[in-house]
Image: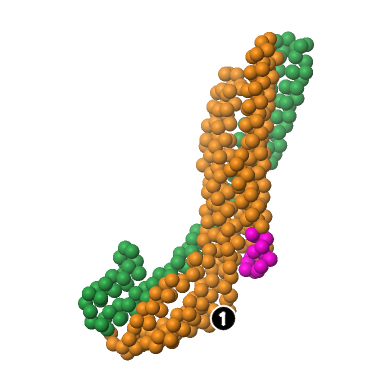
Amino acid sequence: MALTAQEAFNLSKQFRDFAIALGNYRFANWQSLTPTQRRDIEDEEWSLINASSDMITKAVGLALEESEASVRSIKKSVSKAKKAIKKLEKVKGIIEVASAMVGLGAAIVSKDPGSIAKNTKLVLKAANVLPA
Amino acid sequence: MTHQHVSVSFMKLKVFFSGLFLLGLTQGCVDLKAIQDFANISAESAEYTALVDNYVEFPNRQKRYQPADRHPQLDAMAQDRITQKADLLLRHDIIEEYMEALGKLAADEIVDQSEELSQLTTNLQNQAGTNPAETEAFGKIAGTLTKAVSDGWRKRQLQELIEQSNDPLQIIVKSLKHIVLDGFGGDDQNEQFAIQSYYQTKIAQSNDPAGIAALKEWQELRTAALADHMQTIQTYAALLDEISEGHQKLFDARKDLGTEQILQQIQQSVKELKDLLDTIKKI
């Protein structure tokens, strides 16, 4: 059976607890231990604390894997939401085009070539054909 | 184009907005500012990625305390964590991106076409052959109805977004909280052990009182910095809880997002999120 992120986190805690227990023993018995014994115990403490940190790295990796499908699912929702936002923004654009068209209509009625050219540009800008 | 053509265009616009009127009757305008605020503050919270940097840097910090023969193992660990960094940041990014989309969709500006409609009304009023009073009335109705229809559509999109995203969002936030509390928090406990072991060993081996005093000061300094980091972790975990609970409330009330009660609850979540974020920034 494969290890889960939670199990890996629990293992990291157990390694840490062993390291702490060994450290407490070393300092509590400092005077009665030989320098070699102190060094050997300290060495074991570092092995245990690094095993704990390695297990944390493993657990984080597993937690990332376990949530991968959800990340893909949210990405899809975000993409859909962005499309909806674009659609709503389009409503404004449509009204702007309608507004510009009315202006162009008035310019044509007035038969003023300058005004026609100006309003034509406004229509094209509103329709995003020309830059704003 | 003749005056008659202008009048026909005007009539077509009236027909268009009459259609909107029928749709508008079934829709109500709602103020979703609380949801927008919740989404914005959640997105801002997700931007906070200093904890990820600290996680990646952990093996290098351990080198201060561990014997040189342990450094190759710490280098390998650092490499593994660098590989995970992009995936960790992706969790933050995806929450931020989702909340930004939610916020935009909840923002009233997106369904407020008053400026564009005002311009359209002005242009129509300037037309020969149109009745100014009628045009003004048309502008007002068009404004109300366009907003009502787009608001109703927006509300359905919001409902759908919240409905489809709640389960995966809860999984991602819960997973991130585990990573923060058990992973980053576990690192802090290991660092606390390393500080204790390193300084206590040096102190026990020393016969120099001044040296011992200096070592104790350094130990206190490192321990205090670590205590701040531990507090940040607890606060960030609480912040993730708040995001999770706030979104769950939105999901539970997704069919009635505009009700006073739910908006008040969300506003309370916003306040708590702001407080938590301020606390993290101050640490």
Q: Label 1 is found on which chain of the structure? A: B
Which chain has been coloured green in this picture? A
State the image coordinates of residue B40 (x, y, percent, origin top left).
55, 55
Q: Quadrant of the C terminus of chain A?
A: bottom left
State the image coordinates of residue A97 (x, y, percent, origin top left).
37, 73
Whether residue A57 is visible to the viewer of this picture, yes or no, is: yes
Q: Quadrant of residue B270?
A: bottom right
The residue located at (53%, 66%) in the rendering is: B108
Q: Vertically, is B29 above or below B267?
A: below
- Residue at the far left: name it: A113
In terms of depth relative to the viewer, which is nearer, B106 or B52?
B106
The residue located at (75%, 14%) in the rendering is: A30
Q: Quadrant of residue B6?
A: bottom left
Q: Is residue B175 found left or right of A129 in the rendered image?
A: right
Whether residue B20 is visible to the viewer of this picture, yes or no, is: no
Q: Say whether residue B262 is magenta.
A: yes
Callout 1, which amino acid? Answer: Leu
What's the colour scheme?
by chain
Q: Secondary structure at mark 1?
A: loop
Magenta segment, which residues? B254-267
Q: Quadrant of residue A14?
A: top right
The residue located at (56%, 40%) in the rendering is: B50
